[in-house]
Amino acid sequence: MKLPVLAASLLLAFGAVHAPLAQAQTAPASAAAAAQAKPFVWENATVYFLLTDRFNNGNPANDGAYGRKQDAAKLRGFMGGDLAGVTAKIREGYFRNLGVDAIWITPPVEQIHAGTDEGTGKSYGFHGYWAKDFTAIDAALGTEEDMRALVDTAHASGIRVILDVVMNHTGPVTEQDPVWPSSWVRTAPKCTYKDARTTQDCTLVDNLPDFLTHSNAKVALPPQLAAKWKKEGRYEREVKELDDFFKRTGYPRAPRYYLIKWHADWVRKYGFDGFRGDTVKHTEAGVWKELKKEASLAYEDWKKANPSKRLGDLPFWMVSEVYNYSIHHGHKFDLGGGDMVDYLANGFDSMINFTMKSDAAQGYEKLFSGYSNILQGDMKGYSVLNYLSSHDDGGPFDPLRERPFESANKLLLAPGAAQIYYGDETARLLKIEGAVGDATLRSFMNWDELAANARRGTTRVAEVHEHWARLGRFRAAHPAVGAGVHQMIHHSPYTFKRTWSKDGLSDRVVVALDLPGDKAVAIPVGGVFNDGQTVRDAYTGKQAVVKDGKVQFDTPAPVALIAQD
């Protein structure tokens, strides 16, 4: 990748520093047209994962909710991002300009009100994983109207929304946030990860109460939750809904079924298109299958009630976070002690692939062909969600953002679905001085650097952003990229094809990488496109006619993304 030449080629489309944001204003219309031309398939999804509190502050009036103080350790307190901020970026066209077709938000449920020291300094539940009330939106993030606006606006832009759900634990215990009854949670022992029992019947860390998801014993509402609902004037309504749920389903009033009801309600109320399951291996696999059943029913109810807002007829979708799962595991994950689990047989359609960040050290062909062989073989009918950085992975592929172009190429062009972690596309730094542990991964989105076109090493943030956007839009328009069969065409310059067909529809693309930046070269496309056919390079926007099994565009660029209009 020759960065000076890349910068020059990008300026052909930029015109000005702020062009990426200006282009976003017109992106939704063209993206919607592309989405109509080629169907959306989850196997090719580009999922944008953001921590709502760290993305964009759309309403400063909700900062400091519940009297939370600004006394947290570095990057461990609330910073003001909210649902309105995400919606504003959807309306701006930011996600569509990136080719994003699904947004994954962290759990928006009301978090514990106090801060607590988890061993890395005082922390608050800005991340969403420290629930106090699964039925309410945290006031720091906004209101029910804000949530409805976010999902409705995303759907109107052709973007699906994934809700992060926690079935494993409550928030930590504080003076303001008492422990749930012992009929609901355990507070010991800590997990030792030797087998299923020592991974599930235990707590992840000290002071993080673990739900008794295995239990079928009848439990009453936690008294603190009942008191909270009464104070808010919704106790009778919530209890009636619970009574109706248990009467309809026949489930025992056991902890997991309360949680299943509460999470399915978010789907029925707002129209979320999928769940990302948190800490999946720490609960019994069957719990997720039960959740999938109820969430699917809720999704169909929402679609029937909102025919003008639905995005097609795809069923409800779920992806799992099974810590340390690799695409190379296929259907079988080893919990130790001979306890093997197939999570894809228990409600999940996709698995987060924890080894993409290390596999990315390989060359393009080894990475791409290896993934394609697995996804077209043992994993056929399912998929993985690849990532290179995330909110809790301390070993990202490129923590100092020294290889942002290579990162984009490998993540967005690899077989499987792609997870962009907020700021991957703007080289947001993942090493923050003074931040300890996973906090260093969770700085506020670097909008200021994008607007100023700040320098990052030998390149600039806006150039990085535009490269990610060009690849992302190509993915969005072509299901063959993530869902298709991979085959190398040529070693140098490295060129491959992807072909996809399903239900009578088909798609085919050719991609060339690491092209010389100082001259245009002929790219082999024989066997994919025929002589005399006109094809377009989505990277430069240039057209050319295939001749002698090759095509040559008149504008040099480091990447060619070739398809027919």
Image (cartoon, rainbow, N blue to C red):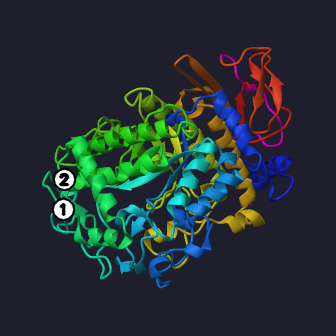
Magenta includes 40?
no
The secondary element bearing badge 2 is classed as loop
CB contact under 8 Å: marks 2 and 1: yes
- Residue 353 shows up from this direction: no
- Dot 2 crowding, Cα within 10 Å, few <14, some 14–19, many 20+: some
Q: Is residue 436 left or right of residue 190?
A: right
Residue type, mark 1 in image: Ala
The residue at which mark 2 appears reads as 253
Q: Residue 255 placed where, x, y %?
A: 22, 56
Q: Is residue 362 left or right of residue 122?
A: right
Residue at image coords 82%, 33%: 542
- Dot 1 crowding, Cα within 10 Å, few <14, some 14–19, many 20+: few
Quarter holding the C terminus is top right
Q: Which of the numbered marks, if any, corresponds to residue 539?
A: none
Residue at image coords 43%, 62%: 392
Magenta includes 516?
yes
Q: Residue 232 placed where, x, y %?
A: 38, 70
The stretch of residues the image draws in magenta is: 514-527
Q: How far apart are labels 2 and 1 at the CA level?
A: 8 Å
Residue type, mark 2 in image: Arg
Rendered view: 389 above or below 565:
below
The residue at which mark 1 appears reads as 220
Q: Of label 2 and label 1, which has the lower sequence position? A: 1
- Residue 33 shows up from this direction: yes
